[in-house]
Image: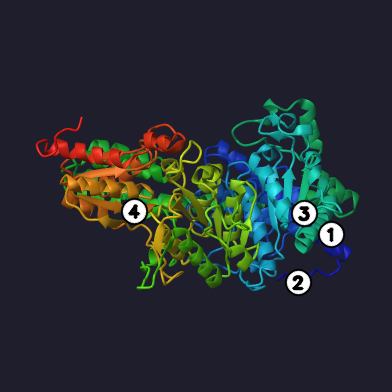
Amino acid sequence: MTESPKQAMTFEDFKKEVLNDYKIATTSRECSLLGRREVLTGKAKFGIFGDGKEVPQLALAKAFKNGDFRSGYYRDQTFMMAIGEMTIEQFFAGLYGHTDLAHDPMSAGRQMGGHFATHSLDENGQWKDLTQQKNSSADISPTAGQMPRLLGLAQASKIYRNVSVLPKKNKFSENGNEIAWGTIGNASTSEGLFFETINAAGVLQVPMVMSVWDDEYGISVHAKYQTTKENISEILKGFQRDDNNNGYEIFTVLGWDYAALVSTYQRAAQIAREEHVPVLIHVKELTQPQGHSTSGSHERYKNAERLAWETEYDCLAQMRLWMIANTIASAEELDEIDTIAKKEVLEGKKAAWNAFVEPIKKEQTELITLLETIAATSVNRVFIQKYTNDLKEIKEPIRKDILTISRKILRMIVGEKSQPLLATWITNYTNTIQPKFSSHLFSESAQNVFSVKEVLPTYDASSEDVDARLVLRDNFDTLFAKYPEVLIFGEDSGNIGDVNQGLEGMQEKFGELRVADVGIREATILGQGIGMAMRGLRPIAEIQYLDYLLYAIQIMSDDLATLQYRTKGRQKAPLIIRTRGHRLEGVWHSGSPMGMIINAVRGIHVLVPRNMTKAAGFYNTLLETDEPALIVECLNGYRLKEKMPLNLGEFKTPIGIVESIRSGTDITIVSYGSTLRLVEQAAKELQEVGINCEIIDIQSLLPFDINHDIKKSLSQTNRLLVVDEDVPGGASAFILQQILDVQNGYDYLDSKPQTLASKAHRPAYGTDGDYFSKPSSEDIFEKVYAMMNEVNPNDYPSLY
């Protein structure tokens, strides 16, 4: 690793280090205590703190090296302070929701306090050297949601150590020596994501150290209602490795025993770092002095005996006793440290509050000056002055106060000379402030998806018609050779080359680590991809069928989709998710819950290619960008014939661009994926009765038609039909909203825009099940015909 090994310590050096640890822990505790008061007095909205967990986090921090990653729990503030990645001021800036990364580097006010992150990217969105810093992946609130990502962070070390085509030293790894450290509360080990990840890490044998902070409660619910035997390490004993079987090394340690904690974490780090064996550390007998959060008091659910025990075995109290007993410090010396910590925390809190509120006060003053000028000439001066005085009286304003009052006054001066002045101020103010809360949902770097231009596939006279799966397979072959950091994994992806043979022969050619089979565990498949993408690899995570993506939708929605946003562009995970769906028969394999997906994963691009050449072009495009995406291949398209392109790996399907695949003058039909083939068939039949349809392939749902080409089509046809195999009101509702609301397509419509979707139920099994559940070419024909009948009943008399 990059850090120099420590020399043997003298007792004085040891004493100095322990005292410094105590100072950090005491400072952290004071932050928790004062933070709670800030919430109760109204300066902050909510607080969830790390009090009671300080001492084990000191031990973790000692074993944590440059290049390592944390994927943790929202009580790890002491750890972040101990590794030098959070100051007192930054702690309080996060509590107040400061929107400046310079003050709240964790999330710029986008997450509540207690959610920690370091910066993997510079201000331009480019990778920093992660081996030269201590790293924390950005926390999320959903309990156990940090677990799947943790698996991928650990697996990256295994890939960097064992894949020969990758350099042994780069910005992301030094020979795979890095550990991924996980933390979780004991109650959250009840979540399925915890068990799925624990199992997967044991199978994969990756350098992951999992700490369970055990204080016996999950909010108010005791461990006896959470965990069999009330003991997570006891029930995981079957994962303990032995001479004949891989598995875990499992340790238990008391959370108030400083010396034992330091020793345990050093042993765990050595095993994980050197042997790439996962380790579980069950840290028992911890406390929670202020209860779960500022939402309530733990006195409501803990009896007097438990509360007395918590006072005695508070980890800071026990650390004090140990230090005094071992002549490291006297009680008076420790009292002095406590006093200094209280003073520093109070000063840091004041500095953070002033930094938060002063810019807003300047904005308040600016508006007051403007409103006084406006009031002087307004017929409503009395009312304006009343609002102005109300604004003046707000001693600690927030930006909502400023905009609310300015917008109310704007209504009072409509038609007056000062109206444009205030309207311009409001517009400029909103344009300045809104990005503080809305930027970086997608990448704003030079590698965003819009930086890649379309490159068409090329063919010549010798280009053969082949099974479409071969276009994908040969394109993947080119990509694996071109990008050594690319790897793909999923159920049946390796040995048999995926269920549709799109990866046929790839594992044999590129090895089991780059083309890998995994177990049936969709959430951690996604997590593997997220974690590895956060460490510079370019993973493609394969979910066998689109319906099974729902197992992973929470991880996609809460973690991957929000990553750039919740770090304001300082972390990224350019993961590609590969799946297949549409038009298969049966309730659980119909593959079209698109409305559910697109409304859960804003922050991830959702791409719906109509054939395998288009799909391959999307993979080629995405590998030149730094953004995550979901690609849904057409399940019934692998055996259809397509021509083999000459420029494999080079042609690129543009993202956010629709394609007109049939010109027409009477109506615009918009669709995507496999349904387009039915639309094309219906259009041929409609042409026979004199109805000329324009067909537009959406290609990507997120982003949607950035050039507004559908609106341009409507200006020629004046009619719109959206055909979708999702349920009514699913993706078709989103598509209509984009066309009518965003593109103002209604300006060109002569008829009501309509949709044709599947039935509200899941598709029944068999060919008849498909026919009676999803749109057929006859349905499309009759829908368009009925729309034309409304316009011209003489030429198109009613069919029914």
Residue linked to disc 1:
15
Mark 4 and mark 3 lie on one chain; the one further toward the N terminus is 3
Real-space Cα separation, disc 4 to disc 3, in angstroms: 46 Å
Q: Secondary structure at mark 1?
A: helix
Image quarter of the C terminus: top left
Residue 233 vs 450, above or below: the answer is above
Q: Residues within 10 Å of mark 4 (few under 14, many from 20)?
A: few
Real-space Cα separation, disc 1 to disc 2, in angstroms: 21 Å
- The circle on residue 4 is 2
- Across and down, in percent, residue 110 comes to 50, 49
What's the amino acid at mark 4?
A: Asn
Residue linked to disc 4:
431
Mark 1 and mark 2 lie on one chain; the one further toward the N terminus is 2
- Across and down, in percent, residue 283 comes to 78, 44
Residue linked to disc 3:
59
Real-space Cα separation, disc 2 to disc 4, in angstroms: 48 Å
Dot in front, 4 or 1 = 4
Residue at figure coordinates x 40%, y 59% from the top left: 641
